[in-house]
């Protein structure tokens, strides 16, 4: 797999990765019907297409030349000093092979002025929490946390 910038031709494959990954991750937490409702709204082609042109952001795919196996989307705020990781998903069949780490590294490299990266994660998504903690993220417990959602942060300075 190699990581590259997402393009309009990738939108169907990105949606397929997100739908499959969301069902595999969240059906047991929210139920399949709710996950379908969420993915239909948040991961519609129109919603994904809007991210391609969003200022101060980067939208990436992990691709092996035959298929998209992972996606990541992040944007910078606070004058570019903080990166907010909005999405990082790898197909369940490809997890544990370093693809998530490749996507995360490329997101960080895309924002060289940033001092920190922040994300929110479902409290019951223990696999994602383990991944983020293994990659240097620390639970921040800041005011952005709400029921069922944890906030993690990683310093990028120095």
Image (spheres, rainbow, N blue to C red):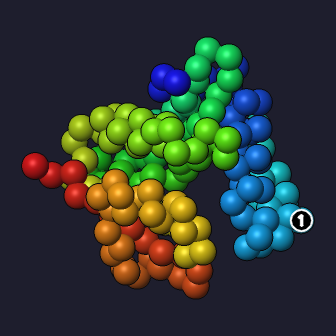
Location of residue 138 by image quarter: bottom left
Q: Nearer the viewer, residue 38 or 80?
A: 38
Q: Is residue 79 visible?
A: no
x%, y% of residue 137? 33, 62
Residue depicted at 61% across the width and 14% down the height: 65
In the displayed image of the protein, which residue is found farthest to the top? Answer: 65
Residue denoted by label 1: 33
Location of residue 78 by image quarter: bottom left
In the displayed image of the protein, which residue is found farthest to the bottom? Answer: 147
Residue depicted at 29% across the width and 58% down the height: 136
x%, y% of residue 57? 45, 40
Marker count (numbered): 1
Residue neighbourhood size for the residue with mark 1, other residues' Cα within 10 Å, grouped as few (<14), some (14–19), many (≥20): few
Residue depicted at 51% across the width and 32% down the height: 60
Residue depicted at 35% across the width and 58% down the height: 134
Q: Is residue 20 visible?
A: yes
Up-down: is 33 above or below 51?
below
Q: Is residue 33 left or right of residue 57?
A: right
Q: Is residue 84 left or right of residue 13?
A: left
Q: Is residue 112 left or right of residue 83?
A: left
In the displayed image of the protein, which residue is found farthest to the left? Answer: 158
Q: Nearer the viewer, residue 44 or 77?
A: 44
- Disc 1 on helix, strand or loop? helix
x%, y% of residue 97? 50, 38
């Amino acid at each position: 797999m190699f990581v590259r910038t997402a393009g309009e031709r990738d939108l169907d494959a990105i949606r397929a990765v997100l739908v499959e990954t969301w069902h595999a991750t969240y059906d047991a937490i929210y139920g399949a019907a709710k996950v379908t409702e969420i993915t239909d709204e948040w991961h519609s082609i129109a919603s994904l297409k809007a991210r391609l042109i969003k200022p101060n952001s980067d939208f990436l795919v992990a691709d092996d030349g035959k298929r998209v196996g992972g996606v990541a989307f992040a944007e910078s705020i606070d004058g570019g000093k903080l990166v907010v990781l909005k999405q990082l998903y790898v197909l369940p069949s490809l997890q544990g092979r370093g693809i998530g780490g490749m996507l995360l590294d490329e997101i960080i490299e895309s924002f060289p002025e940033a001092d920190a990266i922040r994300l929110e994660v479902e409290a019951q998504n223990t696999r994602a929490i383990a991944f983020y903690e293994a990659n240097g993220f620390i639970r921040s417990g800041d005011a952005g946390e709400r029921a069922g959602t944890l906030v993690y942060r990683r310093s990028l300075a120095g």
